[in-house]
Image: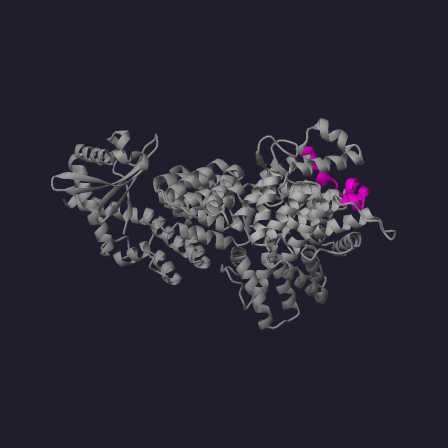
Amino acid sequence: MRLPLPLPNWMGAWPPGVRPRCAHVTRAGVELLLVRPEGGWALVQCRRAGPRAEARTLAIDPSLAERAELVARAFEHALGRSGSAALGWLDAAPEALAQIERGEAQLGDLSGRELLELLDDGLDDPELLVELSARSDSPLVAAAVVQRLVAREQLSAALTVWERGSEAIVAAAEQTPSLLACATVMESLRGDGVAATALAERLGERASDPALHEAVAASWIALRDPSAAAVHLRARAQIEPSVGAWEYLMATAALARDPDLVVEAAARARALGADDRAAHVRAMIQSGAFEAAEATVREQLDAEPESSALQVELASLLLRRVALDEADALAKKALSSTPELADAHAVRGGVAVLRSEASAARAHLDRALELEPEHPQARLWRAEAILKSEPEADPSTDPHLRLGHLANEDLFGAPFDDTALWQILFALVRSRIDPALALHGPLAYFHRALLRDLHPPELHEPALATDAGTVELLWQTLARFGGSRSAPFSMLASEGDEPSAPDLILCEELASTQVQATRCQHRLLTTPVEQVLAGFEVLAERYPDSPHPHTYTAEIELWRGNYQRAWELTDAMWTRTGTRWSYIGSGAALGLLGRHEQALERWRIGRERFKTFLGHEATYCHRGEVYRLMGRLDEARADLLQATRASETRVGAWINLALVMLADTDGEDALAPVLDQIDGLAPVLVWEASRAAADTPAIRVDRRRPRPVLERALQLMRGNRSSVMHTFVDDRGRLRVTPDRHLEIWSRVAQRLRALPEHGLGSALLSDLIDANQARS
């Protein structure tokens, strides 16, 4: 066993150059971690050897390797100057650890054996853990039990212990980082990401050793802030360097789009023997470190010159920056040894498109799609190749229109419809089919906003004034993407077909108004709802033609229960733009206001305009609920079955379906799997609904009396029928947010925090035993 050891007060008098960051105790002695402000670290083991302290360096930063002996002597000198206090501490700490391991520690009514099992994570029975916490008034015990339970996904038991001990845990958290970590996990699990974010920030200020840095990083990753996580993962990797630590940082920095940190972490991992170069290249590409990715692949290819996979990977990177000759040569070489390689055909097809060789492009891209029918890059390239093809004469149809429809089929086969590149290509395809609709219709704001964001006013304003100018600017914009047809999309840093420098930039910030509105909405996880709504106001001012800031605002108002405000926003957008979500949202608001016939009429008109509902759209859920409330149970069941089949995570649809089945007197066997879905998707919602409906909180709907819990759950959800972000309003009027897979995510965090009970409970037990041992001596 290795437990964290509180640093004694007398160490505060040590010179800064030898003052340790943290300490641990093992049977062999006390381990002190030195982290130098100017860089470098050392782990030194200290123990008593007769009348003096003895130190030896266990591990040290390579930059300090030549000074390992000097570091050990410096610690011996500092301990010697601290005299009998230091010698007593070096004696007492290992003895205290031995007492804990022998089961001799005590805390209130808990035996030493129980405490040892809790520290060792040896208790698997959730009932036993709950009972153990009930016999102790220590917040350290409660926090340790909660952490163990969440790691096992025993949410009901964890919530029981948390609600009993949360006040004590939060009150003592300022002095004990492990309690802050426990509170962070539980507040987020319960849907209060705003409180969890504040706790994570406080925890970060107190992080001092690798386990605490790991705890902070894991929390920030779950809170979807990889940039904040990377700060602590870098500190952890510097203190305890390993391939795993640096590669974990590398992957997190890639999520944060920090190319410099990705490159640094990959280099550190390689220096320690990492050999997963493919993972390094993926992280570099994801972060925008394209030059480093290209260099890494070239290095691999030098070692494996006949690898067709590496040839194509390098060719794809070269194609991004329009290095067409080398990209084509590499893809051609790959096909000579592996003729069935769809990726190589896609690269050669892309090269041919950029060379305006449409027939050659079509041949390679057709072959790529024969080999891999859903190949996304090939579909994007072929859509562009079709647009650049010379139409064949056909008196029966407009040849340009026919090519437009062919390109449209390929475009909708590519899974990138939320990206700027796809929207630009979509506008070009649709301008071939119906120029007036594409360039002036209700969806024209998509490409107009992107063109305004990318080009200065002196360029985009005259271009957007005419159809020909708009189309020309769309083609110029597409050219700026170079040969990038895979995520993450990149753009050429300089304009022109052959840039003078191979610089590429990520185009993460160039996003459609819908993507920007979605990002703003996702901030609800960690940001007060008022600030999120203010963000939509900024978007609305920046993009006055776009309905998305208004419809996404309306969706949140539905979630808050402000149905009249949601109706006003969505009805205005339906009148102004006639877009799909405006009829969905306005119908939903009408239904929630009790205006059922008007809601059905709005959805009927929407379907008439768009010819059909999308299979996954929320209309099926909202309309099914309206039918249920009107007593039209067969129609309700049909809609709700469609809603749950298309989106298995749509909690509101499952709850309404269960209520339909109860009204239709379906048997228990039919109802059971529906209730299981609700339990699995929204355990915290069920917990709160059970408390309100039956005074007994539970994470499973009561099978004997399910109706009160289900009805209360819908009341708490207000108008949220989302399949992605589940929200409800608690009894204090706060909007709680629990996205899909919430428990799974935070359970993984708790698993990464396995060392925290040792930090809190173990450290406290050590302190008490050390004080007792020193008092006896």
The answer to which quarter of the image holds residue 618 is: bottom right
The answer to whether one can see residue 546 in this image is no
**Extreme residue in the top direction:** 458
The answer to which quarter of the image holds residue 644 is: bottom right
Magenta highlight on residue 79: no
| Vertical relation: 55 (above or below) 28 | above
The answer to whether one can see residue 459 in this image is yes
Of 82 and 125, the residue lying toward us = 82
The residue at the point 88 percent across, 51 percent down is: 395
Which SS type dominates the magenta stretch? helix
Of 248 and 574, the residue lying toward us = 248
**Extreme residue in the left direction:** 51
Of 62 and 75, the residue lying toward us = 62
Residue 720, x across and y down, in percent: 62, 52
Tell me if 178 is positioned left or right of 765 in this view: right
Tell me if 371 is positioned left or right of 122 in this view: right
Look at the image and name its color scheme.
one colour
The residue at the point 22 percent across, 48 percent down is: 769
The answer to which quarter of the image holds residue 152 is: bottom left
The residue at the point 47 percent across, 45 percent down is: 300
Tell me if 474 is positioned left or right of 131 in this view: right
The residue at the point 59 percent across, 42 percent down is: 327
Of 773 and 262, the residue lying toward us = 262
Magenta highlight on residue 442: yes
**Extreme residue in the right direction:** 395
Image quadrant holding the C terminus, namely top left
The region drawn magenta spans: 430-453
Residue 19, x across and y down, in percent: 27, 33
Residue 447, x across and y down, in percent: 71, 39
